[in-house]
Every structure is written in C-alpha cells, then in structure tokens.
Amino acid sequence: MIADAFLWLLNRTPSLRRALWRVFFDTLAARFGNVGWWTLMNYGYAEPEDTATAFPLQPDDEAERYPIALYRHVATLAPIAGRDVLEIGSGRGGGASYVARYLEPRRMVGIDLSGKAVAFCNRRHVVANLQFRQGDAERLPFEDRSFDSVINVESSFCYPSIDGFFAEVRRVLRPGGHLHYTDLRLAHELADWRAAIARSGLEVVFERDITPNVIEALHRDSKRRRDGGRRIAGGPFAAIADVFTGVDGTRIPSLLASGGMAYHSYLLRKPPAAQPVTAYAAG
Ligand SMILES: C[S@@+](CC[C@H](N)C(=O)[O-])C[C@H]1O[C@@H](n2cnc3c(N)ncnc32)[C@H](O)[C@@H]1O
C-alpha cells in the first residue's frame, strides 16, 4: 500500500520526480550502505534455456546472476572491449563492476544521482579502470564526445525529461558511439517512449521486447529477492520490500505478465557524421 502510494505520487508529480527518487535511493544507500552482498537493483534477465552455467561467473558474483545477466544482455549488443564506457544510473555498482571486470573496457565510469550510492560504490567496488561519480542524467559532468559507449539499465524511468537524457547521451558520445539501453514502462507510456527515442537523434540499431525474459528471471530469482528483502526490511516493511524487489505475486511481475507493463532493450547509435549538439537546457 505504501509502495503503491509512492509510485502513484511519482506518476502525478513529474516536477518532483528527480528529488523524490534522489531521496528514495539516498535513503536506501544510507540505510544499507554496509550491505555488501546487494549490488544490483534491476529486475534481471533470463533466456528460457538458461542453466546455472549458461555464462561463466566467479563464485562471488553467482548470487546476482540474473541482474548481472541483464547487463550482459545489453552490454554485449556491441563491442565494449578497449572502449571508454559511461554508465548513467549505476546504482549500487554491481553492473558497472561486472562490465569492468568481464568485458574489458579501457575505462569505465559510473554516475548516479544518489551521492550516498556513489560513496557505497567507491568503497565496495575497487576495480582498476572503474570509478564512480555523482551526476545527473540530464546534466552529465563530462566534455562533449568523451565516451565510445553509454550504458543505461532500468534508470531512465526516473528521469523528469527523457529528451534531456537523450540529448546529453548524444553530446557525450563520440560519433558512431553506442547507447546500450534497457528499461520498463507501463503500457500506456510505451508510445511516448518510442516517440522520444525516434526524436533523440540516435539511430535504432536493435530493439527487442524482453518482457518474457524479465518475467522468467524474476520468477527464478523470487526466493533470493524475498529473503534479501527480509534481511534488510523485516516486520511491517517486508511487504513493501516484496513490491519493490518484484517477488512472485506482487505488482511488477503481475503487470509484466498481464501486458500492463513492458521491458525493452535497445542498441542506439550516434550517427558517425553527426553535427555538434548543444547542451540540453534543463529547467
Ligand atoms: C532501479 S535503480 C537501477 C540501478 C542499476 N542500473 C542497476 O541495474 O542495479 C535506478 C538508479 O537510477 C538512479 N537515478 C535516478 N534518477 C537519476 C538521474 N536523474 N541521474 C542519474 N541517476 C539517476 C537512481 O539513483 C538509482 O540508483
């Protein structure tokens, strides 16, 4: 009920959206800053034929296989090795750490609106060529054309202006660079989302509806999600944790299964000969 009220408030107050999400994720990071076993916050990805050994992971990464698999799915849509990579909305850093350790970028930077999440990441993920900084998706603290690839996983639904986000991605990407992008939307938001992608100035190289893969991942991961939620939010808060973590039978898996919500992945490309783009003037 409290979770539903929070989501209702967010949907009806776009002007407060950035501040509300910052408070929400700052609170999570402040309260659970020492919870080192929880490093990813997305709903995950599974191929129907997945087995535990579908792709190799080190033992310490195994528990978060399905959220890592979403990063693997989207990050491998185009080569990352040897490139300068930015993740926008890096959260608790497990995805950026996976990319930095397994996919061999030259340099990887994660930015997130939540300063407390960034502090957690810099303590938890000590990896060569990986760093985390605080930043806003609509005002990226980087020079034009600084990155070959941008990764964005289950974060853009929080942004007050999706156009501002795409304009900033275009600005910081080098010509020919890629946005590896995945997120979810309510069914009635899909047309607006597609229209924003179409006017972004980025070319659509690949698009896929991965809703069945996310449903499958949530189901396989449900026990870990439920148990993890109870380790950090017991008693009367356990039901709220179940809603946010997507435990079987709660709002997110139900909406995905009924068609009320969809999860898509994209590979978008900045045209090789794109004209310089001026910074988006966020309000
Ligand atoms: C659902 S979490 C996903 C985190 C991570 N990508 C993952 O998959 O584990 C969404 C993240 O987006 C971040 N975020 C929300 N609004 C943002 C903004 N305007 N700029 C940068 N990050 C933002 C939040 O702080 C949060 O860490």
Image: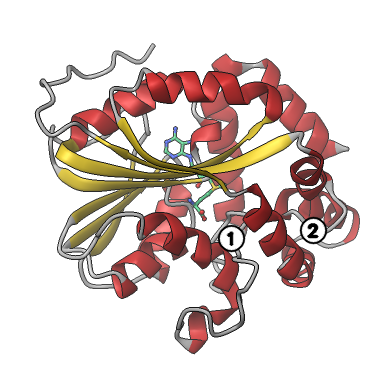
Label 2 residue near ligand 1, CB within 8 Å: no
Q: Residue at point 39% right, 21% down?
A: 198
- What is the three-letter code of the residue carrying label 1? Tyr
Task: Select label 1 or label 2 by which is in front.
Answer: 1
Q: Circle 1 sits in a helix, a strand or a loop, which is it?
A: loop
Mark linked to residue 239: none
Image height of 185 relative to 119, above or below: above
Q: Quadrant of residue 127 in the image?
A: bottom left
Mark 1, other Cα within 10 Å: few <14 / some 14–19 / many ≥20: many
Describe residue 8's horizontal placement relative to residue 57 as left or right: right
Amino acid type, label 2: Val
- SS class, disc 2: loop
Q: Residue at x 20, y 42 (%)?
A: 177
* Place of residue 161 in the rendered image (x, y in percent of width and height, measured from the top left): 45, 20
Q: In the displayed structure, does residue 102 sit left or right of residue 236?
A: left
The relative height of residue 281 versus residue 100 in the rendered view (above or below) is above
The residue at 55%/54% (across/down) is: 29
| Number of the label disc, if any, that sits on residue 247 | 2
**Total residue callouts:** 2
Residue placed most toward the observer, 70 or 116: 70
Q: In this figure, which residue is indicated by the disc labeled 1?
A: 45
Find residue 265 and report its horizontal and vertical position in percent.
49, 45
Q: Is residue 108 visible?
A: yes
The x and y percentages for residue 56 are 45, 83
